[in-house]
Image (cartoon, helix red, strand yellow):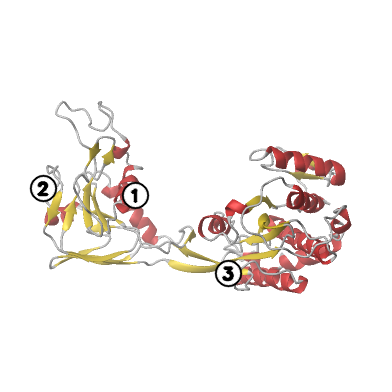
Amino acid sequence: MKNILFIVSALFVACNSSQKTVGEQTSVAQTEVIADPQAFAVTITEKELKEHLYIYASNEFEGRETGKPGQKKAVDYLKTNYEAMEIPPAKEDGSYLQKVPLEFPKVPMGSIMAGETEYELGTDFLTFAPSAGNFDEIIYVGYGIEDKGYSDYQGLDVSGKLILIKSGEPVNEDGTYVISGSSKQSVWSSRSDAPGARLQLARSKGAKGVLYYDPDNYDRYKKYFDYLKESDKSKLEIKVEEENAALVLLSDNMIKNIFPAIKETQTSGSIPQSMSLRIKSNNEPVSSENVVAVIRGFEKPDEFVVISSHLDHIGINKNGDINNGADDDGSGTVAMLEIAEAFKQAADTGNRPKRSIVFLHVTGEEKGLLGSKYYTDNDPIFPLSQTVANLNIDMIGRIDPKHEGNRNYVYLIGSDKLSAELHELSEEINSKYSQLELDYTY
């Protein structure tokens, strides 16, 4: 059975890794490390896996699409099973659920007042993010570049200010470019990279808002803006909580009224123009959750081995057909429940692992690895610096044409990429206990 390899490997990673302890530790009662992990691995049975999977991949769960009712049923099913097994939640507040705030990006709504004149979003200017603030002046920062020995920010304090930047880059009298020192343009003239680089630099300087004039590419941005405004196909993303300066793209008409001399003006300075940005988010929020449980280790409880799988699938298609996702990743999800039960039985008989085992069911995998990204980048419940390994289980429930007639195999991905020790451990444990064909195709 494929998942025996995972529990045996996890047991040995949890118990025998040579990684040094990090952080303070608390003692947990323990007799001795288990001598034979198979005594608990055999509690994982085909019968129980099928019982779980026939429920988890049933029509009742509606394909478990992120944020939809079926995904909520999946989350509740996992939570209920961990409660029944008396495996504690990972969060300090006693919850198994790690909320993952998501949203469908939409073009924002609003306008800009410059003096007594109101400018309309989508006609006079463009932006793809909310921006607000009242300003008594605009700080003109030329090309908005800082590179090597050149800086448009020299002598300027733009913290909390609204700044104006134009596209392009400075040129010497002989026609060569200042940044490159040659006839070759630098990255600051890149149509795809330059706007983001300027915005990032402005944010690092503390700018509150960024006005950007790029006449050569405004029409391209306008087409994209109009597409997003009419489209319902925006990609689900992790919600950004913090307020950052947004890039506001100005039309020819708007720049002529605000600063008509922008093209020929190279010197940075203040423009005596009041401006009020009133641009609000129009994004569609989506509620979703990771499910996280933990069994604490006895010797190194502050070091963690994470076992993971994704709890979501792709839901119901336009024809009303349910994509049940029995293999992707119902198979990995129910295997995790059985593995967790085996670890719990081991712990209950005095055979607790040395390191803590984290059972992490992530949401939004089908939408772009959102749940796992949120755990690592936004809110790691347990410090990544104290996480020894992550064993991820995905699609272990069916046989592909390459292995027709052979159930005794598993694709093992990445074990030899980040850690020679993990690769050798997997090979050793498989040879001793499972004798699976380890396929390293991927």
Question: Which label is found at residue 68?
Answer: 3
Q: Is residue 313 left or right of residue 28?
A: left
Identify the element where label 3 is drawn.
Answer: loop
Question: Which label is found at residue 200?
Answer: 1
Dot 2 or dot 3, earlier in sequence: 3
Tag 1 and tag 2, C-beta contact below 8 Å: no
The C terminus lies in quadrant:
top right
Tell me residue 377's x, y (percent): 52, 55
Question: Which label is found at residue 5?
Answer: none
Q: Mark 2 points at which residue?
A: 261
Q: Mark 3: which amino acid? A: Lys
Q: Mark 1: which amino acid? A: Gln
Sort mark 3 into few (<14), some (14-19) or many (20+) by Cα contacts within 10 Å.
Answer: some
Q: Mark 2: which amino acid? A: Ala
Eye-nearest disc, 1 or 3: 1
Tell me residue 317's x, y (percent): 59, 62
> Residue, x 63% and y 59% (percent of image)?
24
Front-most of residues 406 and 352: 352
